[in-house]
Image (spheres, rainbow, N blue to C red):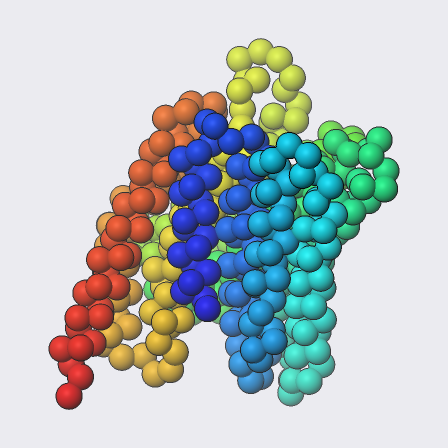
């Protein structure tokens, strides 16, 4: 299921970016976030939560939650794309919220059933699912109080991007980067534990500020500085040779963290600028092209071999991982450059990012073909 969700997300990203000049803004964002990113994150969480709690793997019932989330996301895309389909908004939100709450309750159950204390990253996943549930509750509230629709939509958007996706990403990146490089970060657990309140408070303040009182967004962005700066400085001390390398997933993960921080800064700036030369600022475009694209492609470069063939790591895994990470440093630079350009309102930034994404998809298809040939050639 997880490899399918990866390629589904990549296809959703590509389709949305290629169709962005013709699709509405809401349809563009929901195709990427609700139909692409959300089911993939649910699938990844169902894989990582047993690891973080040292319990058995997820059951088939939990494995269906990404499909439930995808159904809700597909309804949201349809509601944005077709006139008169807006009545479907509550149904899509309810399906996705059901999946989010079920995954959160399952995680809490695994936490209680385990022996010892869970990894601190688990709390980041649970906070992210809480943010998603609140974001979807805001959509249901908008159906009851339509006079507050615009404010609730802004609250929903920021809890989705910074809360659900952002907190999941930072919690995962903290442990994924050391895994990619093969050298531990002994401060990772303590940093995750100490930084969670700052990130959660910052997310809620940014969402509330975007919806009702913009100065709160600056306060929330300032609170996010601590977890982002702490993670970036730790990577800079320990992993800078790998981050600056030509190949591998490490440059892409570092680019994702940079893109996330820049999108937050651009969002705070855009909230204070109504006129003038900066009216074209587009934090959402930077979030998608400069953060989500390197994040998913970088994580896939490391995790796809494990998800395709779980178990003991063999030369097959190393070979596929090496092929998926080829020229990862170049793609990281292109994603960041395209994201910055798109965030500043230049249309060529989106084209550069989608071209880089298609490059990765073609590379992944060729890498998988080579891995299949390698497997057959080594089968007695």
Q: Is residue 321 left or right of residue 97?
A: left
Which picture quadrant has residue 82?
A: top right
On screen, residue 59 above or below 360: below
Residue 106: percent from the left, percent from the top? 68, 74
Q: Is residue 110 left or right of residue 180?
A: right
Between 309 and 330, the one nearer to me in the picture: 309
Residue ID at (28%, 72%): 317
Q: Is residue 75 left or right of residue 178?
A: right
Between 25 and 298, the one nearer to me in the picture: 25
On screen, residue 111 above or below 35: below
Between 336 and 196, the one nearer to me in the picture: 336
Residue ID at (57%, 63%): 66
Between 359 and 147, the one nearer to me in the picture: 147
Q: Is residue 147 left or right of residue 280?
A: right
Residue 366: percent from the left, percent from the top? 22, 57
Residue ID at (22%, 70%): 372
Residue 283: percent from the left, percent from the top? 55, 32
Asked if residue 68 can be seen in this view, the reply is: yes
């Amino acid at each position: 299921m997880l490899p399918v969700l990866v390629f589904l997300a990549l296809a959703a990203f590509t389709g949305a970016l290629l169709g962005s000049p013709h699709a509405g803004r809401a349809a563009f964002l929901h195709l990427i976030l609700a139909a692409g990113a959300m089911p993939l994150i649910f699938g990844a969480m169902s894989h990582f939560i047993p690891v973080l709690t040292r319990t058995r793997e997820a059951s088939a019932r939990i494995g269906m939650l990404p499909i439930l989330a995808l159904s809700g996301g597909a309804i949201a895309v349809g509601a944005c794309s077709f006139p008169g389909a807006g009545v479907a908004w509550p149904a899509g939100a309810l399906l996705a919220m059901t999946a989010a709450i079920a995954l959160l309750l399952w995680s809490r159950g695994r936490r209680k059933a385990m022996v010892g204390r869970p990894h601190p990253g688990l709390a980041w996943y649970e906070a992210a699912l809480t943010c998603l549930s609140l974001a979807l509750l805001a959509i249901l509230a908008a159906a009851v109080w339509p006079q507050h629709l615009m404010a609730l939509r802004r609250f929903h958007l920021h809890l989705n991007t910074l809360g659900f996706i952002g907190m999941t990403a930072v919690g995962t990146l903290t442990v994924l980067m050391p895994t990619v490089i093969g050298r531990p970060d002994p401060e990772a657990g303590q940093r995750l534990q100490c930084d969670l309140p700052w990130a959660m408070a910052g997310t809620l303040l940014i969402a509330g500020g975007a919806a009702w009182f913009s100065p709160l967004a600056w306060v929330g962005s300032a609170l996010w500085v601590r977890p982002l700066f702490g993670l970036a400085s730790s990577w800079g001390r320990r992993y800078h040779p790998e981050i600056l390398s030509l190949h591998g997933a490490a440059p892409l993960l570092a680019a994702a963290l940079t893109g996330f921080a820049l999108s937050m800064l651009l969002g705070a700036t855009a909230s204070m600028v109504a006129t003038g030369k900066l009216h074209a600022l587009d934090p959402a475009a930077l979030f998608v092209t400069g953060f989500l694209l390197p994040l998913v492609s970088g994580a896939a470069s490391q995790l796809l071999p494990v998800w395709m063939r779980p178990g003991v790591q063999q030369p097959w895994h190393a070979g596929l991982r090496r092929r998926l990470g080829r020229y990862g440093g170049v793609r990281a630079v292109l994603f960041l450059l395209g994201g910055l350009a798109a965030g500043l309102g230049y249309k060529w930034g989106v084209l550069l990012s989608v071209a880089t994404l298609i490059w990765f998809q073609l590379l992944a298809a060729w890498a998988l073909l080579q891995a299949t040939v390698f497997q057959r050639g080594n089968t007695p």
